Amino acid sequence: MKLTRNFCIIAHIDHGKSTLADRLIQACGGITQREFHDQMLDSMDIERERGITIKSNTVTLSYAAKDGQTYQLNLIDTPGHVDFSHEVRRSLMAAEGALMVVDASQGVEAQTVANLYLALEYDLELLPVINKIDLPAADVERVREEIDADLGLDPFIAIPVSAKTGQGIEDVLEGIVSHLPPPQGDPDAPLKALIFDAFFDKYRGVILQCRIVDGTLKPKDTIHFMHADRDFGVDELGYNQFKLVPKKQLTAGEVGYIVAGVKSVQDIEIGDTITLADRPTATPIPGYQPARQVVFSSVYPMSTDEYQDLTKALEKLAINDAALTYEKDSSAALGFGFRCGFLGLLHLDVIQERLQREFDIGLVISAPSVKYKLQLKDGSTIDIDNPSNWPDPSTIDAASEPYIRAQILTPEEYVGPVMELCRDHRSESQTMNYLSAGRVEVVSEMPLGEVLFDFYGKLKMITRGYGSFDYVPIEYRKTDIVKVDILVNREPVDALAYLVHREKSRARALHYCEQLAEEIPRHQFKIPIQGAIGGTVIARSTIQAVRKDVTAKCYGGDISRKKKLLEKQKKGKAKMKQFGSVTIPQKAFISVLRAEKK
Ligand SMILES: Nc1nc2c(ncn2[C@@H]2O[C@H](COP(=O)(O)OP(=O)(O)OP(=O)(O)O)[C@@H](O)[C@H]2O)c(=O)[nH]1
């Protein structure tokens, strides 16, 4: 155990966590140059395109240090986005130390601080790494000052590196060995191990990633999941070295994989403690938190023929993503679909893209919503995340919605606009802390529902890209929420209904109406589009009538051209939805929601 180091890399998004991980792996000969390709740990296509690490992966490296000893380094990768903070927590729980990467040109940002707090919560030893020193804008001394003043870490142990050129990588490996502590634990005690991740393999079922805290685990042992209260027999265990490398045992302090006949990640709970069924430990590892879905949205296939495909696709995605929940939902306008729960807006985006890209299903997705708590006049309380379940307003006594504490770091000159942005998004309190190097931390308590749509994009715009943002959920607070219906030709399109604070209801309804008026083609009659609360119309626009003959310009002469045009029109129709007598293109739904997210 003295020769083992379990560590994570934490960083603000884009500061180079994945690139540094790749470099460390390469330096330890974890993979040959030929096999090596950039962003090794980001395996999914979408992740690679977006440059965001979503599923954590772990890898065991062997490092021959300058002291003549060979160390086993377990690098536990962590996702880099607020949506996945519970996954970050689990990774941190599996480690004793963390490399805290700070970009030498950007300095400390919101997620650097948020990650620092998380790491301190789990008592991790931190080793600061100043990355991207090859950049002309790199300012290592300024970043050292920030590490001291803003993070409270020892600036003199910070290691300057370039994950791009490889400069300083050896120093990082030496720093890991000398600065981060080895694990502790008793190999003879009853088994206590943390399941910190899991992924699904077509041939082997679920591969569990675990950190053994105490005890020893061997093939053929029966493991017991303490929170899920389920037993599984261990078929195989070993180290993750890009390939799964089977071993005879995993023991206290080690990190490795387990194959145990688990069929779907939904069958177990990540973050759970496993122990031996016939010699259990008395208490699970503390700090367990189940994944929390905070954003909900309905997903419908564009064409009802695709419902089965959508069902299968969601099943497949959920097998590998324990944080995705879905249940049957139906809409008068769109037919059968699913109500899905997500960790945040990015998680929703990723799932939506995968459904469309990997499974090629045309989708209509309703406006994302948070979960509201309602106190009814009959004394009961209900949770509502779906506008279609919104009760008659006269039965509601009080409503509350989830609030967050948002933490924004911005250069001083943008503080005014940032505060204004927060106020525009119903911020209830704002405090400012002046940091080093002319930066300010703005802490604001505001509704989660307000940051779902356009907050992050606007923040980036008003701070010219320098502002950064993170948040933690805090509590539910009283609110005044209304349900807005969107009516096309006087018929409500239920998939477009949304829940919103009364103050914001008109502006959003206007936006919907205008957007739909732009996207819905003219029909042979006039189409009113309205936003309404109950029976009261709060916004409206109109699509004028037109009579359109697509073949008119063919002078009747060219038959094949005429055919082609009709064919084209037919194809176009496949992407249209019929609502009463009005045809709405899929594009219209998408653009209403898109514009909202910006
Ligand atoms: N010039 C320079 N660029 C770097 C260096 N390290 C990383 N980058 C670049 O910075 C960008 C972000 O790097 P990533 O490794 O993807 O960052 P990350 O922190 O893992 O980002 P997420 O996975 O999205 O959390 C990429 O374009 C890298 O090529 C470096 O040392 N020098």
Image (cartoon, helix red, strand yellow):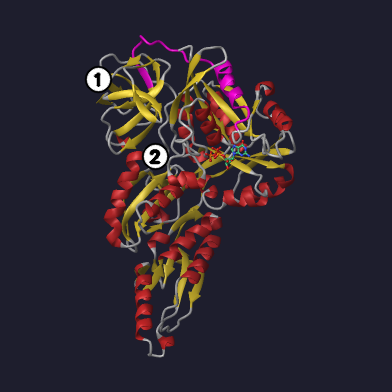
Q: Is residue 372 visible to us here?
A: no
> Could you classify mark 2 by the number of other residues whose Cα lies within 10 Å: few (under 14), some (14-19), or many (20 or more)?
many
Q: Which residues are magenta?
A: 166-193
Position of residue 415 measured from the top left corner of the image (x, y, whole percent): 71, 45
Q: Which amino acid does the dot numbered 1 rest on? A: Lys
Quarter containing the C terminus = bottom right
Q: Which residue is mark 1?
A: 220
For numbered disc 1, what is the local secondary structure?
Answer: loop
Q: Please say if 163 is above or below 191.
A: below
Which quadrant contains ligand 1? top right
Q: Please say if 59 is above or below 185.
A: below
Position of residue 487 measured from the top left corner of the image (x, y, whole percent): 42, 68
Q: Which amino acid does the dot numbered 2 rest on? A: Ala
Residue that appears at 54% across and 20% down: 123
Q: Is residue 31 visible to us here?
A: yes
Q: Which residue is mark 2?
A: 323
Please check the rendered image and state whether residue 356 is part of the magenta-colored stretch, yes or no.
no
Please check the rendered image and state whether residue 179 is part of the magenta-colored stretch, yes or no.
yes
Real-space CA distance between mark 2 and mark 1, rounded to the nearest whole angstrom: 29 Å
